[in-house]
């Protein structure tokens, strides 16, 4: 629903920093997040390791980014346009069809039969921030 908040999750690990104590460390930039709650600190301390944990397991309190949802719509996959592909992050280049690039990447991620007429795309939009 518009206005709902989406918590962004990322690769991480429970960690014990020599100066800060139990915390969460993020793989992307090695930044640390120290929990405010003693129970969360104890949880981090009991699970600290060198192994990275999947984003889906990141505790809500450790998320560095929460985004408000602007809208959610659906459209048939065959109605996607070149401009939609560019909006999704395909860099426009001379001699390269952005929609074809997007379609190829989609099939690589979701499987060869995933791009077929009648399939529905869910379009999730977030407000732009400056």
Image (tube, helix red, strand yellow):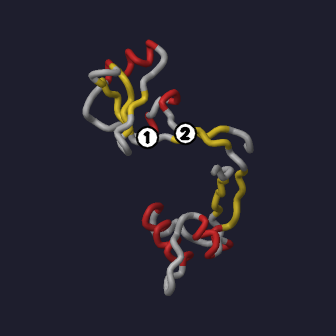
Percent x, y of residue 16: 30, 23
Q: Nearer the viewer, mark 1 or mark 2?
A: 2
- Residue at 65% in and 62% down: 120
Q: Residue at x 52, y 30 (%)?
A: 60
Which disc number belongs to residue 65?
2
Q: Considering the image in quadrants, where does the N terminus appear?
A: top right
Q: Are marks 1 and 2 in contact (CB under 8 Å)?
A: no
Q: Say which residue label 1 marks.
A: 55
**Within the image, what quadrant is residue 29 found in?**
top left
- Point out the residue furthest to the bottom here: 95
Image coordinates of residue 59 in percent, x first then y, are 47, 29
Q: At 36% from the left edge and 33% from the top edge, which residue is drawn?
A: 25
Q: Is residue 68 left or right of residue 29?
A: right
Label 1: few (<14), some (14–19) or many (≥20) C-alpha neighbours in 10 Å:
some
Q: Nearer the viewer, residue 50 or 111?
A: 50
**Residue visible at 72% across and 56% down in the picture:** 73
Mark 1 to mark 2 CA distance (whole Å): 13 Å
Instruction: Report the label total.
Output: 2
Tell me where residue 61 appears, x and y as whole percent: 51, 27
Query: Which one is in front, 63 or 121?
Result: 63
In the picture shown, does residue 38 fall above or below 59?
Answer: above
Q: Earlier in the sequence, mark 1 or mark 2?
A: 1
| Disc on res. 38 | none
Label 1, secondary structure: give it: helix
User: In the image shown, does 103 or 129 lie closer to the viewer?
Assistant: 129
Circle 2 crowding by C-alpha within 10 Å: few under 14, some 14–19, many from 20: few
In the image, is residue 77 above or below residue 35?
A: below
Q: Secondary structure at mark 2?
A: strand
């Amino acid at each position: 629903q518009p206005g709902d908040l989406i918590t962004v999750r990322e690769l991480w690990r429970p960690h014990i920093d020599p100066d800060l104590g139990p915390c969460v460390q993020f793989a992307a930039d090695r930044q640390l997040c120290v929990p405010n709650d003693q129970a969360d600190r104890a949880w981090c301390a009991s699970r600290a390791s060198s192994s990275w944990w999947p984003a889906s397991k990141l505790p809500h309190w450790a998320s560095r980014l929460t985004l408000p949802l602007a809208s959610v719509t659906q459209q048939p996959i065959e109605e996607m346009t070149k401009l939609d592909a560019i909006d999704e992050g395909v860099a426009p280049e001379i001699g390269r069809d952005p929609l074809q690039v997007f379609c190829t990447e989609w099939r690589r991620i979701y499987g060869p039969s995933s791009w077929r007429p009648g399939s529905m795309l869910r379009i999730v939009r977030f407000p732009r921030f400056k």
